[in-house]
Image (spheres, grey):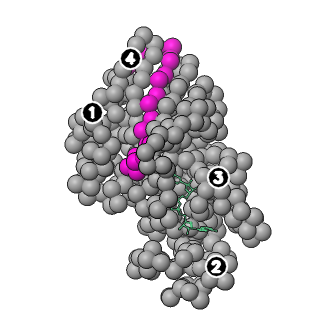
């Protein structure tokens, strides 16, 4: 059993911990919390061991021990700390000679950039692995299978990013849209899929529900709608939605279908946005930013430890998280 701890129990950390706790090849040693708040109480109610930094532990009721004790018991830590804090934490992990999985808010030089579908095997025996961001994960999940069928000449990606997560008290300006040409997302895709020509421009909009990407792809053979159905019908982590009209609609149906936290964990290909013009095709993807990277964190742990093959790990993760069922229900509702 791989002994895993989760450092940082926010949007990403709480979701990763839930899956680690039920994974057949992993034991959740515990989570590290920095504030003794409601999330700590919920973690304890789930029977998770809650650890805290030594200097802060007296503020926690029922803590299982200090951060150092958690690390001592762990083979690997999933760092789910706020953006750029992982780089500081890495010094601690290195001093303790512990492997780590980082998140997409870290710079790419922190470790091997990972997407399960694209480069699972490259993570084996790496000390440090970075699960790329929600946006980059969505792009890789869609682009990689396309490169296996088509000779892609060039991709232009326009990203409409959410301004904040639903649980955030911080966030973007309320009444304006921000933009950034040559955003880091294209470069980030190239850290995973190096041989694709891609540019990206990102807009940040005052909404919390999902990111939306619009891709324009030039390829040798025209990409058709039928080809997209064929390529993605068996990809559990890419949903083919025909009739969704708004991100609100997608989130509402996720609620109505009773998915835990409304999480879809998937890149949602919006098939009613598909337009083809000669050898150029364009379509949009909706990205549930809070959950999409969670399957990749789980696969990254298995890939790094060399405990499962790519096929076994992705199948196990998909089954544990009910990804096939989510795909089937959402594709039926939006069929
Ligand atoms: P978050 O703010 O929701 O959670 C971070 C947690 O880390 C908080 O609970 C905070 O108290 C805790 N923390 C504070 N100091 C810490 C320390 N020194 N070490 C460890 N943890 C500490 O953040 P998040 O949204 O879960 O993001 C975590 C990482 O995942 C970031 O790199 C982010 O870019 C990435 N990510 C976020 C999203 C998203 O949409 N939220 C999607 C994909 C990737």
> Could you tell which of marks 2 and 4 lies nearer the N-terminus?
2
- Residue furthest to the top in view is 278
Q: Residue at x 75, y 64 (%)?
A: 91
Q: For mark 4, what is the residue?
A: 276
Specify few, some or many for label 1: CA neighbours under 10 Å numbering under 14, 14-19, or 20 or more: some
**Does the residue tagged 3 have its C-beta within 8 Å of any atom of ligand 1?**
yes
> Could you tell which of marks 1 and 3 lies nearer the N-terminus?
3
* Distance of label 4 from label 3 (alpha carbons): 36 Å
Counting from the top left corner in percent of width and height, residue 232 is at: 38, 34
Counting from the top left corner in percent of width and height, residue 328 is at: 27, 44
Q: For mark 2, what is the residue?
A: 53
Q: For mark 1, what is the residue?
A: 242
Specify few, some or many for label 2: CA neighbours under 10 Å numbering under 14, 14-19, or 20 or more: some
Q: For mark 3, what is the residue?
A: 106
Q: Nearer the viewer, residue 297 or 281?
A: 281
Location of residue 116 with respect to 50 vertically, above or below: above
In the rendered view, does 272 fall on the left or right side of 68? Answer: left
Report the mark closest to the observer, 2 or 1: 2
């Amino acid at each position: 059993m791989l002994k895993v701890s989760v450092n940082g129990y926010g949007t990403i950390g709480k979701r990763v911990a839930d899956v680690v706790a039920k994974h057949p090849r992993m034991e959740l040693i515990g989570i590290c919390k920095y504030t003794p708040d409601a999330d700590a109480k919920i973690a304890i109610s789930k029977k998770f061991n809650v650890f805290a930094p030594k200097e802060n532990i007296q503020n926690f009721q029922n803590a299982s021990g200090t951060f150092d004790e958690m690390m001592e018991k762990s083979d690997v830590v999933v760092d789910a700390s706020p953006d750029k804090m992982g780089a500081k934490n890495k010094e601690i992990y290195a001093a303790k000679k512990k492997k780590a999985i980082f998140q997409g808010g870290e710079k790419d030089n922190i470790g091997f950039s990972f997407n399960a579908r694209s480069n699972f095997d490259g993570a084996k025996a790496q000390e440090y692995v970075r699960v790329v961001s929600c946006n980059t994960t969505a792009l890789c999940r869609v682009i990689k299978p396309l490169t296996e069928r088509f000779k892609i000449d060039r991709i232009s990606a326009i990203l409409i990013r959410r301004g904040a997560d639903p649980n955030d008290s911080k966030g973007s300006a309320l009444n304006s849209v921000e933009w950034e040409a040559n955003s880091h997302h294209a470069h980030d895709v190239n850290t995973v899929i190096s041989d694709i020509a891609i540019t990206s421009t990102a807009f940040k909009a005052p909404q919390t529900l999902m990111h939306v990407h619009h891709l324009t792809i030039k390829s040798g053979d025209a990409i058709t709608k039928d080809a997209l159905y064929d390529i993605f019908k068996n990809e559990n982590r890419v949903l083919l939605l025909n009739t969704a009209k708004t991100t609100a609609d997608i989130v509402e149906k996720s609620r109505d279908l009773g998915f835990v936290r409304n999480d879809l964990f998937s890149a949602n290909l919006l098939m009613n946005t598909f337009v083809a013009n000669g050898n150029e095709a364009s379509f949009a993807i909706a990205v549930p930013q809070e959950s999409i990277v969670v399957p990749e964190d789980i696969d990254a742990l298995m890939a790094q430890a060399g405990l499962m093959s790519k096929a076994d790990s992705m199948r196990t993760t998909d089954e544990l998280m009910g990804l096939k069922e989510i795909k089937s229900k959402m594709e039926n509702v939006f069929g």
